[in-house]
Image (cartoon, helix red, strand yellow):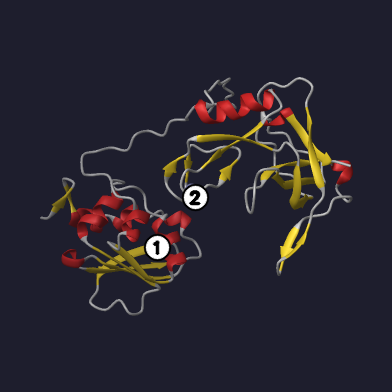
Amino acid sequence: MTTYFGVDVADVIETMPSRFRKEAAAGIAGSFGYDLGEAGRWRLAVRDGDAALAPAEDLDDCLAVVATDPQTFVGIQLGKIDATEAMALQKLTVAGDRGAFGSITRLFQKYLPPGEEALPETELVVLKQTISVDQTFATGPVMGRFLKGLKEKKILAMRCPVCGRLQSPPREICAVCRVRNTEWVEIGPKGEMRMLEYVYYASPDPLTGETRETPYGAIGVLLDGCRDEEVFWHLLNPAQLDRVQMGSVIDGQVRHGSRLRPVWAENRTGSIDDIQYFELDD
Ligand SMILES: [Zn+2]
């Protein structure tokens, strides 16, 4: 008698037909193979809602064959090993019709070691509730300083001491050079339009969860003092969506984009919304 998890592997195998929920097997016909290593090879024949198990040398005629070691097999039957995980670890393979094998597997009642009785089915209490928690969190020294700057109508960036690039909103480190940013620089507040995403399908506003009105323009503005890819992302005045022109450099030919200026909110709280949007500076 070989035991795994304190359970006799032969008992787990031999009780398979009695644990088979015949009433649920209507319409299923075919043989399923179990290649369990030193615990032998078995064929489970299902027909007319009946299941018969017999040792088998040859499993070639089976719809699907599962191959695993006895310990994994017992562990899965007891719910101590996750079948999907065992497959990922290649401790269990299924050859043939995986879908059919999956549906057969669900038709077995859980194995209970001799002497253990199934717990009576009890109705579980289910509470459906959305939990909403008011939370406050620190913005940190870097983002905090940037947000405080917005309150004072200043747009701040941090410069990388190695590559010199500016990031705004600022980051504590330059992820390209993997060094800590140290220098604060005020940029803009005016700049040149470099990119425009004309948005027809609104993602929720990350701060409020509300869906924005469409279409709106998400823009990349190259604020004065910045260069190349150092664009600042914000929104464009929706009334000016069709009036702006994007800047570009193609084959050394510079085409300037529209000049934009920020429109500041009257009551600034230290939020990215302290800039309502950018608009044409004409
Ligand atoms: Zn850098």
Q: In the figure, is residue 213 to the left or right of 133? A: right
Q: Earlier in the sequence, mark 1 or mark 2?
A: 1
Residue 198 seen from this side = yes
Count all numbered tags in the image, as a single digit: 2
Nearer to us of marks 1 and 2 is: 2
| Residue in the foreground of this view, choosing between 169 and 15 | 169
Relative horizontal placement of residue 258, taking residue 43 as reference (left or right): right
Residue at which label 2 appears: 163
Residue at disc 2, CB closer than 8 Å to ligand 1: yes
Query: Where 160 sits versus 133, above or below?
Result: below
* Image position, residue 208 (x, y; %): 69, 30
Which residue occupies 30% across, 52% down? 76
Q: Position of residue 232 (x, y in %)?
A: 67, 43
| Circle 1 residue | 50
Could you tell me which residue is drawn at 14 percent across and 51 percent down? Answer: 3
Q: Secondary structure at mark 1?
A: strand
Q: Is 208 located above or below residue 40 in the figure?
A: above
Closer to the camera, 59 or 188? 188
Q: Give residue 39's quadrant in the image.
A: bottom left
Q: Is residue 266 above or below residue 63?
A: above
Q: Please state which amino acid type lies under the numbered disc 1.
A: Asp
Q: Position of residue 116 (x, y in %)?
A: 24, 38
Q: Residues within 10 Å of mark 2 (few under 14, many from 20)?
A: few
- Image quadrant for the C terminus? top right
| Label 2: which secondary element | loop
Front residue (pair 67, 142): 142
Point out the image quarter for the N terminus.
Answer: bottom left
Marker disc for residue 183:
none
Residue at (88%, 51%) from the top-left corner?
242
Question: Where does the image place residue 229, in percent across and percent down from the top left?
Answer: 63, 52
Distance from Cα at disc 1 to Cα at disc 2: 73 Å
What amino acid is labelled 2 in the image? Cys
